[in-house]
Amino acid sequence: MLKNILLEEYYSKALSLLKQLIAIPSVSRNEDETADLIFSTLKENGFSPERKGNNVWVKSFISDNLPTILLNSHHDTVKPSASWTYDPFIPTEIDGKLYGLGSNDAGASVVSQIMAFFELSKQTTRTRPYNLIYSATAEEEVMGEGGVISVLPLFGKIDLAIVGEPTQMQMAVAEKGLMVLDCKTLGKTGHAARNEGINSIYLAMEDIEWFRTFQFPNESETLGKVKTSVTIVNAGTQHNVVPDTCTFVVDVRTNEHYTNEQALNIVRNHMKHTEVTPRSLRHNSSHIPINHLLVKRGQELGLTYYGSPTTSDQTVMRLTSMKIGPGDSARSHTANEYIEIEEIKNGIDTYIRLLNGLKIS
């Protein structure tokens, strides 16, 4: 564990930085000013950060022969809802809690990882047998093309990523993927009063029933079953016309046993009447093996592991990764979002203890 004086110093810097981040609106695709702040913070602390768009990163490399670990979190936020009772852009500290938009998701992870990077970058090969990259990236909340996916190729080979999201500093060792399917069923129009036409709604109902009842055979220990949910259905123009088109939308949450492409092929092979088009295939499930040295280190520190139903930048990374960070996912995207101040201190300390001397090769 860090000496208390040093931990308090990092904590004080992290809290100050988080308050500055909260005070700058950074809704997805409009994060330029928070990117400016993070860039200048790294530079003022003696580093040489790099930037592309609103993504900022910095490297601490010891040797090209060592594996590389990535610390990553996002500095964009969702739009504030109308039900906030505090000003979402004024950091408000009350009873050990810091209120403000992005405080929990994922500002606390951003600043905790920066402080961990500051400490770990001091180390040499003897105590840090890996290269280290810290990145604060954009557009996570909208899964945008200008986010982490746009800069990952610039980082080189990454052997392990630690993604900062609110997990109460417990280890999310797996995360469900997301695929949205646009489905179209075609029939034939006709007059409802006569025995004519082919009702596209009735045809679609057969395929919708398949989504309701089908079970993908491979179940995950941490994520459970693949889940499909029909969430939108549209058909018809007026009461006396048999509709020739029925469209519906399906939300698919995959586990680590299926890529989105594999799940899509299974769906298409079972559709009797429906054409299926995915909006995207890139948000796949992610996981880290339970026997990975990082997971074992976490268990030694008393951390537990679980499978996360929510998505993050992990879905586009396609590399070994763990999601862990201060805060609680239940507070994300809610009015009066907050982080408990002690969670920041614990976040800094836990990130450092997880990575201190970790050997992953």
Image (cartoon, helix red, strand yellow):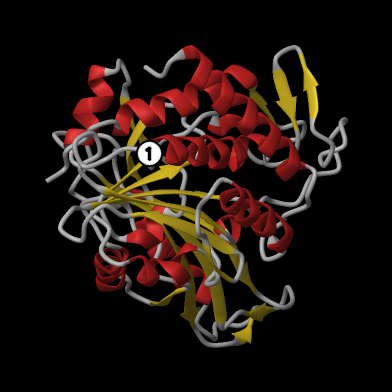
**Residue at 50% over, 21% down:** 6
- For the residue pair 280 and 318, the one nearer the viewer reads as 318
**Residue at 42% over, 34% down:** 119
The local secondary structure at tag 1 comes to loop
Question: Residue 345 appears at what percent x and percent y?
Answer: 54, 22
**Residue at 31% over, 37% down:** 123
Q: Which residue is mark 1?
A: 122
Residue 216 relative to residue 57: left or right: left
**Can residue 323 be seen from the camera position used here?**
yes
Question: Residue 170 appears at what percent x and percent y?
Answer: 39, 26
Q: How many numbered discs, if any? A: 1
**Can residue 255 be seen from the camera position used here?**
no
Image quadrant of residue 171?
A: top left
Question: Residue 183 appears at what percent x and percent y?
Answer: 47, 73
- For the residue pair 234 and 49, the one nearer the viewer reads as 49
Question: Residue 325 appears at what percent x and percent y?
Answer: 47, 34
At label 1, the amino acid type is Lys
Give above or below for 306 relative to 129: above
Give above or below for 72 relative to 105: below
Give above or below for 267 relative to 299: below
- For the residue pair 258 and 164, the one nearer the viewer reads as 164
Residue 360 relative to residue 354: left or right: left
- For the residue pair 218 and 99, the one nearer the viewer reads as 99
Q: Residues within 10 Å of mark 1 (few under 14, many from 20)?
A: few
Viewport quadrant of the N terminus: top left
**Residue at 73% over, 36% down:** 19
